[in-house]
Amino acid sequence: MGLMTGKKGIILGVANDKSIAWGISKKLHEEGATLAFTYLNEVFEKRVRPLAESLGADLILRCDVSKDAEVEGAFLEVEQKWGHLDFLVHSIAYAGRDELRQPFVQTSREGFRVALDISAYSLIGVTKAALPLMKNGGSILTMTYLGSTRAMPNYNVMGVAKAALEATVRYLAAELGEKGIRVNAISAGPIRTLAATGISNFSEIFGIMENRSPMHRSVTTAEVGNSALYLLSDMASGVTGEVHFVDTGYNIAGL
Ligand code: NAD
């Protein structure tokens, strides 16, 4: 018996085997969870499908979170196949290339809208779609970063989106608590993933983190997976609205 035996959940945000969502998926599978996966479009499907199938998934669904119809369609399929859902992992973010390279003051209205829509609003959108399936309560987890509360070079509008995402976690948690639905975030330290390549000075941020964090190293997607397991399982049954740091302690360091 694993901690997730008998539980069914959906993972949004696997791009490849370096994705944080993939580290989380492997851990949940190890602990007995049954998983459904979504992918952004056909380009991503090619990489996501074999990974998902390697964990025995047979619900592998297209879901661009900027399109309401795709979100509704994906959750409808989950409803038809499973009838209910115990957990949801939201591991999605996007900002245009220019917004992560130009000075922050040059952020365009459209760049701001897109970043906030895909990286923050989408948590509300997918939670709304998952709600009717979480009849017996549930656990929802999203991924954030320290750039939400500290100004990080080049993180720019993504920091604003993460601030909105963390506030969204609290508002959803406050509202859904009485239904037995918990909503939490993990704030991960820098990890080399596809999304991270969009941040122009990522290597520098990564190096500084390795030097200055209390544990003098970066974190792995497996370590994020371990903490995700805790938050998604009944081990965290009394925990909601939290931003839990998995960053080898970097956020507590003064200098
Ligand atoms: P990743 O590139 O592997 O994952 C990002 C995912 O977002 C991809 O699967 C991509 O398909 C998906 N996505 C983008 N736009 C989408 C849309 N419109 N609809 C559906 N999916 C869409 O990178 P990652 O680092 O694993 O990122 C996952 C999450 O972790 C993100 O929220 C990211 O901000 C967060 N995070 C990453 C780091 C890091 O250093 N890598 C640190 C802290 C938090």
Image (cartoon, grey):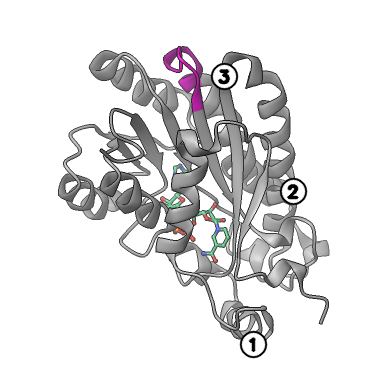
State the SS at label 1: helix
Q: Is residue 169 magenta?
A: no
- Residue 227 spot, x, y in % from top left: 50, 52
Q: Which residue is mark 2?
A: 163
Residue 211, numbered circle? 1
State the SS at label 2: helix
- Residue 17 spot, x, y in % from top left: 31, 62
The C terminus lies in quadrant: bottom right
Q: Which residues are magenta?
A: 129-138
**Residue name at image x 69 percent, y 20 percent:** 175
**Marks 2 and 3: which is nearer the front?**
3
Please give left or right for residue 242 compared with residue 34 in the image.
Answer: right
Disc with the residue nearer the chain's start (2 vs 3): 2
- Residue 131 spot, x, y in % from top left: 50, 17
Q: Is residue 136 magenta?
A: yes
**Is disc 1 surrounded by few (<14), some (14 to 19) or many (20+) residues within 10 Å?**
few
Q: Nearer the viewer, residue 20 or 160?
A: 20
Q: Can the viewer see residue 227?
A: yes
Q: Nearer the viewer, residue 224 or 130?
A: 224
Q: Which residue is mark 3?
A: 180
Disc with the residue nearer the chain's start (1 vs 2): 2
Q: Nearer the viewer, residue 130 or 97?
A: 130
**Marks 3 and 1: which is nearer the front?**
3
Residue 22, numbered circle? none
Q: Label 1 sits on what residue type?
A: Asn
- Residue 248 spot, x, y in % from top left: 60, 71
